[in-house]
Amino acid sequence: MQAYHLDSSGNMGGLVLRDTSTPEPGDYEVLVRVHARSLNFRDTMIMQGRYPLPAVSGVVPLSDGAGEVVAVGSNVKRFAIGDKVAGSYFPQWQSGRLTMEQAAEQYGCTRDGMLAEYVLANEQGLVRTPQHLSYAEAACLPCAALTAWSALNGPRRIIPGETVLTIGTGGVALFATQFARMAGARVIAITSSAVKAAVLKEHGAHEVVNYVEHPDWDKQVRALTAGRGMDHVIETGSIATLPKSINSAALDCQLTLIAALASSAKAGDALDPRIFAGLLNIRRVFVGSRNDFEEMNRALELHQLRPRIDKVFAWEEAGLAYQHFESRQHMGKVVIVG
Amino acid sequence: MQAYHLDSSGNMGGLVLRDTSTPEPGDYEVLVRVHARSLNFRDTMIMQGRYPLPAVSGVVPLSDGAGEVVAVGSNVKRFAIGDKVAGSYFPQWQSGRLTMEQAAEQYGCTRDGMLAEYVLANEQGLVRTPQHLSYAEAACLPCAALTAWSALNGPRRIIPGETVLTIGTGGVALFATQFARMAGARVIAITSSAVKAAVLKEHGAHEVVNYVEHPDWDKQVRALTAGRGMDHVIETGSIATLPKSINSAALDCQLTLIAALASSAKAGDALDPRIFAGLLNIRRVFVGSRNDFEEMNRALELHQLRPRIDKVFAWEEAGLAYQHFESRQHMGKVVIVG
Amino acid sequence: MQAYHLDSSGNMGGLVLRDTSTPEPGDYEVLVRVHARSLNFRDTMIMQGRYPLPAVSGVVPLSDGAGEVVAVGSNVKRFAIGDKVAGSYFPQWQSGRLTMEQAAEQYGCTRDGMLAEYVLANEQGLVRTPQHLSYAEAACLPCAALTAWSALNGPRRIIPGETVLTIGTGGVALFATQFARMAGARVIAITSSAVKAAVLKEHGAHEVVNYVEHPDWDKQVRALTAGRGMDHVIETGSIATLPKSINSAALDCQLTLIAALASSAKAGDALDPRIFAGLLNIRRVFVGSRNDFEEMNRALELHQLRPRIDKVFAWEEAGLAYQHFESRQHMGKVVIVG
Amino acid sequence: MQAYHLDSSGNMGGLVLRDTSTPEPGDYEVLVRVHARSLNFRDTMIMQGRYPLPAVSGVVPLSDGAGEVVAVGSNVKRFAIGDKVAGSYFPQWQSGRLTMEQAAEQYGCTRDGMLAEYVLANEQGLVRTPQHLSYAEAACLPCAALTAWSALNGPRRIIPGETVLTIGTGGVALFATQFARMAGARVIAITSSAVKAAVLKEHGAHEVVNYVEHPDWDKQVRALTAGRGMDHVIETGSIATLPKSINSAALDCQLTLIAALASSAKAGDALDPRIFAGLLNIRRVFVGSRNDFEEMNRALELHQLRPRIDKVFAWEEAGLAYQHFESRQHMGKVVIVG
């Protein structure tokens, strides 16, 4: 089979396409013909050697992929040949509190990922994909969609009628907008252009604040809630937007700080500790468990929601896909098929 | 002012209209001109002398009413003259776990209720009503709507994509259908006619099973969920429907048993203990706290939901309203205005 | 290796000791030399053919066992040779909400259990045992201790200072008494003799009510709480004690109904539906997830708690152990070593 | 009656003792003869004019006091003359999520507090004190004890066996140590001397790390947990200790950041945003609701816990009490009786 490998990190030069033998499933394993993958910020961090968890040398990159089961081991109970599946970001994390042991196994980092024709996985590390989605659409779910889902479906689930703030039009932010609307919340989004505002409204935002026109967008957001502030904030922006996100927060707000962006802070960056002056809860979230993934898929099916795909690249254009993603011009997900 | 009083219980003859002096608010009190009220099953139980909590002799009946603030005491902070308000069923229950002390104070039972021109209340025992609702609509909320809300927004809130079963077209059942849909659930309802099925679909039900056509409706419901069963059951039927409700339940289902109907069981009735054979959770619910009421109103406003009113009676037709309610022919709420 | 097999159900005659070849671990599997097992009510139900899940013909019985890892498959990460482990009742249930798929796999029923010299298990279906416990003690944990733990550590965890009622001196009841005390609760127990009362006090009960002396023990219990009633009830008695348990309950009580006993209700038994007259929550519980098991073991180690063993039988006395268990005279656990 | 008033803020000179008329209770009000009060960090902030909420000019200071009910209004139901009570920090907050309206009313700040012979309060803003405590001891509870209680009894209650880190020997830290131990946790404390370490062990700490001897105390703490880190951190230190607290945290740790200290951050202070690199939850906590207070008192009574009083000052020594408190030399609470 063909697969891309990360032979070295630092730049795109480390990404090498090679032929290897197609693996065979062990007793509890499943072989999947991967038909589509999507890119996430963590994949560019791994490519650049900046991810907190060191990648295995020569690893097949990408956490997110969807495909078809083509072979199953003798003890496999969860899947049969022909099932459409996606990888669960942490293949060992079924539910409950994440352990260090479970966090240490990740597709496209510490074990081979989805930028290959085939992937071999323990049956516990896969989920069925929603029936109404294509492979390209299903490949958008494992990291970005599940992160948005977990942000909203954690220990403090949305009460219908509560307010949710989303930031921008990246993958996680668009999913968060869709999921918050689905749960009965009032969604306020911030963005930088009328075009993006229109996309956000299409995905469920009740109101959109343009932060270029309103650099003091925190005041605008607070005014939209009659001074009360937001009940939930899905902070997908960066450490730079955090102080204003916090200014937008209601008393006892649940602010979710998405992992990848928080991790991207650099030595020398500084935060004003007065961000902690008010009463709020900051929860760091990164992806979710297999159980969360299955619950999300059930909701996607019921509501017939679809991920927004920004652009689809062919198998041989994997490098171009990375470049497009790194340009940060996309709205929605960047996909590689084939 | 004019007010109806329950001078004796047992039958409608005890309901007497009298003139009394209009009260004046104490330091922390509010005087409300009541413009509309609605009837609930508990009101007929009180009328008949079958309610678990004995009513005060001569009490003004009805828990549910909405009106306008016309006078406030010197220490009142929550309301001003002109505010539109409704009574909170348990006026002392602000939030958290209900205490016996809080449960013992109820409008229209242990203290004067809403079937009067004016009601006097501690400011803590009132809430603002949703802006888009008329007085008649707002008067439908305190008991039935809040019971449905509490059933769905308790310790195990709906996960979007979960399944919810509702039973019939009574007040609580219709609100539960609306609220479950609002929270992103898949709603299956059971009822007895095509007309009622159409009303249920209007209020958000995805699927409706006719239990006259399908006496084994539990099997139909289970089939609709591919054998898995329902995640939530809002049991507003009676002890008679409970065994089939339980048969419809998924593993670890949250089944909510509405208080009034459970309390109506009589000596000699019997339940098969094998209803406890499966793994499920049965939670008894009755109305909710002031905080729940305020959260519900926020959601009603956002979603512009309206209660379904079956019939509106004039002030002097209070007795007819009781009779209509007791005939059990209504779909939605029975209201008295004036 | 030697193993007992249930060649038929109905009576003890179906239990047959046989020699079979010792299995070898697959890629994700572990071979355990079992040194001790304990009996549970479900094992006698399986023996008698009354368990809700049909047992595989010839299955090695018993869910509960502890032993030493003697061989591991090539992909095993969680364990090494020499580790002391016990089986997790539902070997596929890691955490979260139990699924039907996970419920269907159980040691000693649908797959071979612990009444053998060796057991083969997927590494996901085992846990490390507490370091301070012997094999005999560790073998007491998987079903009875974890059921008690789950009863108290579910969605509504004990608030220190809350009251907990336990019933009798069976395995689950004694563990529940210990665990409730450990969590800071006030524990009231009911039992039938002064000897048993002393055992309950040793295990942490603050007060014990003798139900032989006080057939209206529900009134005694309520009086001990100044009329308020119990916050938690761990109902390990039977359908017969349930009405009085419910009479002992505080408003909004969490009553846990242990699975095995509820399931033992027979056709013709009847419950008064007025048990549902008050406001309370009934939660059915049966064992728990692997994650729960690991959390329980951490607590057992910190508090250096030990299971109470009633009697230890030798390998060749397995039949006697069953007979002793079925006589219902034991206080604590019945163990088979060797 | 005599009362101290804060006629101006900035320094101790603003604290003036005056005679005023003793108030009389309105319909829903209670008059309390205050016998003891305790000081909290918020009181020195108010004295210095640095508290986020501006104090009323001439206000009677101090949130914390305990005394005896000496008169009740005509509608009062919760208390009778002779009852021993303490003030609830937010007198309007009964339970649930704190609102801005509730947060705005505080004894000793926006309304008269406890440094008076008598205090007048709405019956909803008082709680019964534990029977085994003296007035001096009960006066230690409203702010510091309840803050510690809320930190541990929030949305993620302790699982017995979990680890809790406490910092220092201040009022909140000592209560947190006691309450964590009471809930079955393993408590690790950090402090600066052997004398203080002994006090912490008396109050329930399993292990104490001396941060003077071990400036890298985060590594010590992590080593004590075999590398896993702490499940709960009660951060009562300051912004300065926060980075090391976070280094001590387990994956998905619940870190509670006590309000007063976080609020004390000054312009120009800076935090490294990489504190957000790991997966954890930061929850800001400040005191608690009346319901929390009542639950805490029930637990204090059951466990017969007593606050540690550092020093008791007489009525006329109020200024000395403030000075002693501000010197930060105390271990436990500073009390004013009379």
Image (spheres, coloured by chain):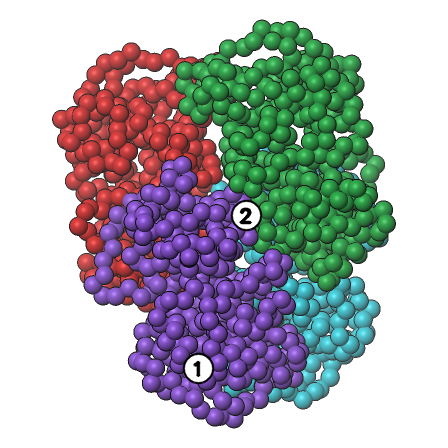
Chain colours: A red, B cyan, C green, D purple
Mark 2 or 1, which is nearer the eye?
1
Residue located at (20% from left, 27% from top): A318
Relative to C43, is D288 above or below?
A: below
What residue is shown at x 18% (from left), y 36% (from top)?
A324
Pointer 2 with pointer 1, Cβ within 8 A: no
| Residue C103 rendering spot, x and y as whole percentages | 59, 29
Provide the residue designation for mark 1.
Answer: D317
Looking at the rendered structure, the secondary structure element under dot 2 is: loop
Secondary structure of residue under mark 1: helix
* Residue under label 2: D184
Closest to the observer: D175 or B154? D175
Instruction: Point out residue A221 in the picture as x, y percentages from the top left corner.
Output: 31, 62
Looking at the rendered structure, the kind of residue marked 1 is Glu
Q: Is residue B201 left or right of residue A168?
A: right
- Residue C295 % position (x, y): 52, 38
Give the quadrant of residue B21.
bottom right
Residue kind at label 2, given as amino acid type: Gly
The correct choice, above or below, for C281 with respect to B61 in the image is above
Q: Is residue A96 left or right of residue C205?
A: left
Marked residue chain, label 2: D
> Looking at the rendering, in which quadrant would you find the N terminus of chain A?
top left
In front of the other: B15 or C215: C215
Residues B127 and A49: in front is: A49
